Image: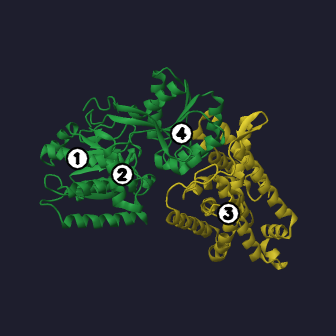
Chain colours: A green, B yellow
């Protein structure tokens, strides 16, 4: 199976890096990630970008003269799997840091373990916000950064005042739409409907009919990725719904796959492959050279993972040690210029990010229609 | 009006999905838990047809044939020895469903697959704009229902099948090849499941687990309907209607469990369900 192949390749990689290791013991980076379960579609791209970061850093002499080594563990995209993965990484493999893209359930299950084992943890997935722990840092977006570009654009360009919100019934779906509602109302709009379907639900008939009858002028959806997103988009299209449609859960790859069904959808992301900067061009070329035809398209989850490994490197170099307290003290003060621009987790352990509002074209490609510089994550963890 | 159309089309989709299961349960008294897997196989037939660049409508006969062919193999190799052990048959078909799901995952990967739409856009129908494909689903459901009724009531096979349902030993004593009747029924059932899978693709996503979501609802409806296609149609209209009403006026999350809850209630009050026999 594909996952096994990745793991085997990875094991080979670890052995080879160990063979020409720099002086000193390797610094171990634990990467618990959903190789199976809901995240299995995106996890391989995250593993690939981690490998590239580690290879580049080791080729340039490592960190404090020590090489980096990856320890990948499958968290099965959920809480139970994450407990096992974090346990084995923290207590058996004794990793120096955990850097990973995971589901919110997996992150919440891992937090007590990194607190007890006292390991720094950089979380690289966008999420619903307000997860706070002295060892936890986040370099991906929160609702405060993702939602405003879409709502602002719909209100300005499409003159939309009435919004309809549709989501999957889970913490990310509800969290995103709860924030969207508050932001829409604060900006002078109204929410004319808000409906959810269970995560495995696929029949949106009743919701689509309510939407059509509601007089809404724009739609914002936040479903679970994959199947629910595709079924909702297809059924909206089939019902002839032609309103401005902001999708908080679709990424470039999925949009491409959906083809014509996705045309016209607005997405808001901190990374799109078409970002025109030397750092992004260099990154895309290095990924293509390293993985060739096995390359998984870099995306808004794999790029923050790549940058987080560099941020960790910068923090260790600033602290001159891998000691947890020193690294945690150094992390807010370091920055790294990656494919998404200059990233620094300086705001209550979260990062101001440049957000891109993109629209899916008829060919499935994403065209950037607006750019929002350095959007602030807001007060995520005022008590830290 | 939209509400009535929602109810009619939801019932039609449920009917299409459940018909293959009913064909097998009604005649063979075997609960085919691999039904979800056959649905998935049918949907992936559409993916293949699209991949080969053929007309998407060809996926309907293709899915029926593939479902039927694989069904024939399954009947001979797995189900045949288990007719007298219906509980073991549940286990065997459940296991088979898992195996098929894994094979599909190995072959096509876990990702959601995309298929071209058979029909897109809306048509004006009695004063409302309504999804063209959902209206087509009603036609397809009627075609399946009428076709099957004709098969049961108007052909030799139907006569034999009804004889097997009523009294199998007597049927055999009268010279009916019950083994063949069973094989044909099973093949028609899995063929219908494949067809249903292909018909679902414009409404849902195609992924290795897509069948599971439909299996429980279809299973409940068939339990209530017994062995009659008429009863199945009534059950689909009533429970599908209830699902739409609950989703519209109460809460879509509750709507998702309406069918299961109502079916359980009906079976509690009247263990025979809607079947008269």
Residue tagged by mark 4? A265
Q: Position of residue A181 (x, y in %)?
A: 48, 28
Local SS, label 2: helix
Q: Residue at x 50, y 56 (%)?
A: B111
> Looking at the image, which is closer to me, B154 or A300?
A300
Q: Kindly identify which chain the residue marked by label 1 belongs to.
A: A
Decide if residue A131 is on the left or right side of residue B91.
left
Decide if residue A288 is on the left or right side of residue A348.
right
Marks 3 and 1 belong to one chain: no
Local SS, label 1: helix
* Marks 3 and 1 close (CB-CB < 8 Å): no
* Image quadrant in which the C terminus of chain A is located: top left
C-alpha distance separating marks 1 and 2? 21 Å
Pointer 1 or 4: first along the chain:
4
Q: Residue at x 33, y 50 (%)?
A: A283
Report the mark closest to the observer, 2 or 4. 2
Residue tagged by mark 2? A284
Pointer 2 or 4: first along the chain:
4
Q: Position of residue B246 (x, y in %)?
A: 64, 37
Residue tagged by mark 1? A312
Residue tagged by mark 3? B63
Local SS, label 3: helix
C-alpha distance separating marks 3 and 1? 52 Å
Q: Which mark is residue B74?
A: none
Q: Residue at x 84, y 61 (%)?
A: B150
Residue A377 image-quadrant placement: top left
Local SS, label 4: loop
Report the mark closest to the observer, 1 or 4. 4
Q: Position of residue A376 (x, y in %)?
A: 33, 30
> Relative to residue B11, is residue B30 depicted above or below?
below
Marks 3 and 2 belong to one chain: no
């Amino acid at each position: 199976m594909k996952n096994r192949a990745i793991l085997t390749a990875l094991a080979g990689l670890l052995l080879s890096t160990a063979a020409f290791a720099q002086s000193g013991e390797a610094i171990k980076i634990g990467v618990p990630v959903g190789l199976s379960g809901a995240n299995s579609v995106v996890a391989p791209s995250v593993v690939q970008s981690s490998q590239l970061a580690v290879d580049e850093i080791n080729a340039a002499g490592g960190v404090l003269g020590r090489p980096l080594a990856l320890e990948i563990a499958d968290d099965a995209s959920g809480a139970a799997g994450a407990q096992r993965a974090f346990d084995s990484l923290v207590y058996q493999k004794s990793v120096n840091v955990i850097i990973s893209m995971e589901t919110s359930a997996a992150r919440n299950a891992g937090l007590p373990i990194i607190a007890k084992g006292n390991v720094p943890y950089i979380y690289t997935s966008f999420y619903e916000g307000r997860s706070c722990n002295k060892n936890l840092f986040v370099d991906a977006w929160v609702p405060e950064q993702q939602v405003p570009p879409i709502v602002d654009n719909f209100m300005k360009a499409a003159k939309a005042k009435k919004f309809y919100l549709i989501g999957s019934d889970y913490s990310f779906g509800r969290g995103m739409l709860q924030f969207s509602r508050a932001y829409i109302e604060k900006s002078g709009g109204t929410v004319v409907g808000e409906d959810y379907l269970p995560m495995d639900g696929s029949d949106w008939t009743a919701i689509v009919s309510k939407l059509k009858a509601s007089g809404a002028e724009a739609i914002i959806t936040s479903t679970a990725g994959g199947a629910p997103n595709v079924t909702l988009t297809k059924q909206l299209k089939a019902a002839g719904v032609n309103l401005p449609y902001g999708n908080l859960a679709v990424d470039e790859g999925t949009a491409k796959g959906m083809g014509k069904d996705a045309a016209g959808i607005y997405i808001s992301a901190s990374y799109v492959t078409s970002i025109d900067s030397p750092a992004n061009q260099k990154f895309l070329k290095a990924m293509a050279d390293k993985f060739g035809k096995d390359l998984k398209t870099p995306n808004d989850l794999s790029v923050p993972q790549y940058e987080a490994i560099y941020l960790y490197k910068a923090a260790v170099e600033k602290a001159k040690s891998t000691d947890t307290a020193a690294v945690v003290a150094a992390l807010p003060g370091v920055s790294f210029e990656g494919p998404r621009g200059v990233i620094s987790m300086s705001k209550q352990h979260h990062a101001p990010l440049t957000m891109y509002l993109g629209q899916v074209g008829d060919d499935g490609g994403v065209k950037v229609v607006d750019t929002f510089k350095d959007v602030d994550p807001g007060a995520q963890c005022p008590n830290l | 009006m939209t509400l009535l159309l929602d109810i009619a089309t939801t019932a039609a989709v449920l009917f299409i999905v459940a018909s293959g299961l009913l064909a097998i349960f009604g005649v063979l008294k075997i609960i085919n838990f691999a039904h979800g897997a056959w649905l998935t196989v049918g949907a992936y037939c559409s993916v293949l047809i699209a991949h080969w660049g053929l007309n998407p409508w060809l996926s309907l006969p293709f899915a029926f044939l593939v479902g039927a062919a694989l069904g024939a193999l399954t009947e001979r190799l797995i189900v045949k020895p288990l007719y007298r052990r219906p509980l073991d048959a549940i286990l065997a078909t459940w296991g088979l469903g898992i195996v098929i799901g894994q094979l599909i995952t190995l072959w096509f990967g876990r990702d959601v697959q995309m298929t071209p739409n058979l029909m897109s856009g809306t048509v004006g129908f009695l004063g409302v704009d309504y999804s063209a494909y959902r209206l087509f689903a009603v036609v397809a459901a009627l075609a399946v229902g009428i076709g099957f009724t004709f098969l049961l009531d108007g052909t030799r096979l139907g006569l034999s099948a009804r004889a097997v349902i009523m009294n199998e030993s007597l049927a055999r004593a009268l010279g009916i090849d019950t083994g063949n009747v069973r094989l044909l029924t099973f093949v028609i059932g899995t063929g219908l499941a494949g067809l249903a899978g292909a018909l679902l693709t414009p409404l849902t996503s195609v992924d290795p687990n897509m069948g599971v979501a439909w299996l429980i609802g279809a299973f409940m409806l068939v339990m209530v309907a017994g062995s009659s296609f008429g009863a199945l149609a009534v059950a689909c209209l009533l429970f599908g209607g209830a699902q739409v009403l609950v989703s519209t006026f109460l809460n879509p999350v509750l709507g998702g469990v309406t069918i299961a809850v109502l079916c359980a209630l009906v079976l509690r009050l009247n263990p025979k369900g809607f079947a008269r026999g």
